[in-house]
Amino acid sequence: MAMHKDLLRRGLSFAYRRLAPAGTRNLISTSLLLTGRDEIPRAITDFATGPVLIVAPHFDDEICGCGGVMGLHATAGQTITVVFVTDGAAGDPSLRGATMPADELKQARARLTVLRESESRAACAEYGISDLRMLNGPDGALAPTNDLVEAMGAVLDDVRPAIVYHPSLLDAHSDHWNSNLILAGALKARPALSGALRLRGYEVWTPAIPNRFANIDAEVDRKQRAFAHFVSQNATVDYPRAIGGLNAYRSIYMQGGQGQAEAFQELSVAAFDLLISAILARPHHDHSDP
């Protein structure tokens, strides 16, 4: 029987490598890592546990991925810190490949960083959150450098979170993937902190395979107000509509499709590390930008 299972696994792996389109291989291979028996996702009902740390690769990911639970934690009186991993300087498509002098391009990107940070400050102020940390990694070219891992570690040491919200490991955006590698590197050096920590991967560019849901009906209006501050980003992508659609779909499971919910992949630090290692071991690893 074991031999038959191994042959089947090898056959499926061969078919996957030969037949799956290159653009889908990474997402399919990641999904295939989840080989355990499916379980009914559970609702998150306790928002009084903290402190809470939110890892946002870009200015706006904090609202896109977990703006609802941010509000629920804030209402419950928890301390919330948001750490932004990149400088947001690549958030204007018109600046990508722009034919302008290097100095002008640098200045334009610097202005965009200031603008986007101000937008997130205004959005987070809707929740009474003012503890924002900037790691200033290169937007669109993020990598898990020692400096960024150490900077993330310094945030962990200061905040001592009980819960960390971060991009799902299924997210196809390269900066989101590398933000997770930076977080993993920082946690690895802090085993005392990691033991009881809960990690919740949120959705932005790629739907996750969630095991936890949160009813955010009470926070929909505040999330929409927060979205309204991202004028620079909403000009190119209708994030309120797109993320609102995702949140409406996620309500199908526990609210009968009559409301909005956010979905998360909750993992222990050990499971988070194991899944990252398994993803890195897969062939055709390519977390490309959307």
Image: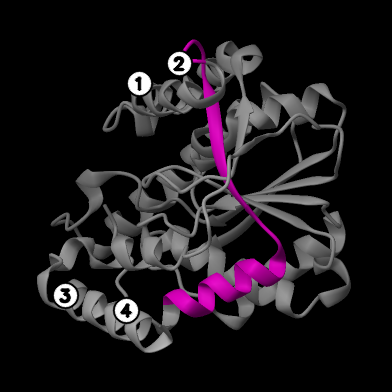
Q: Position of residue 71 (x, y in %)?
A: 70, 25
Amino acid type of the residue tagged 1 in the rendering? Arg
Which label sits in the foreground, 2 or 1? 2
Q: State the residue at coordinates (43%, 52%).
A: 110
Query: Which sits earlier in the primary sequence, circle 2 or circle 3?
Result: 3
Q: Residues within 10 Å of mark 4 (few under 14, many from 20)?
A: few
Badge 2 element: loop
Span highlighted in magenta in the image: 256-279
- Vertical placement of residue 76 versus 95, above or below: above
Which label sits in the foreground, 3 or 4? 4
Front in this rendered view, residue 107 or 69: 69
Q: Look at mark 2 in the image and give the residue it sits on.
A: 257
Amino acid type of the residue tagged 4 in the rendering? Arg
Front in this rendered view, residue 1 or 49: 1
Q: Look at mark 4 in the image and give the residue it sits on.
A: 9
Query: Which sits earlier in the primary sequence, circle 3 or circle 4?
Result: 4
Front in this rendered view, residue 286 or 97: 286
Q: Look at mark 3 in the image and give the residue it sits on.
A: 15
Q: State the residue at coordinates (33%, 68%).
A: 29
Q: Position of residue 96 (x, y in %)?
A: 22, 54
Front in this rendered view, residue 149 or 113: 149
| Mark 3 and mark 1: Cα distance apart in space | 37 Å
Query: Which sits earlier in the primary sequence, circle 2 or circle 1?
Result: 1
Position of 75 with respect to 270 (left or right) is right
| Mark 3 and mark 4: Cα distance apart in space | 10 Å
Q: Look at mark 1 in the image and give the residue it sits on.
A: 241
Which label sits in the foreground, 2 or 3? 3
Badge 3 element: helix
Q: State the residue at coordinates (61%, 67%).
A: 272
Amino acid type of the residue tagged 2 in the rendering? Gly
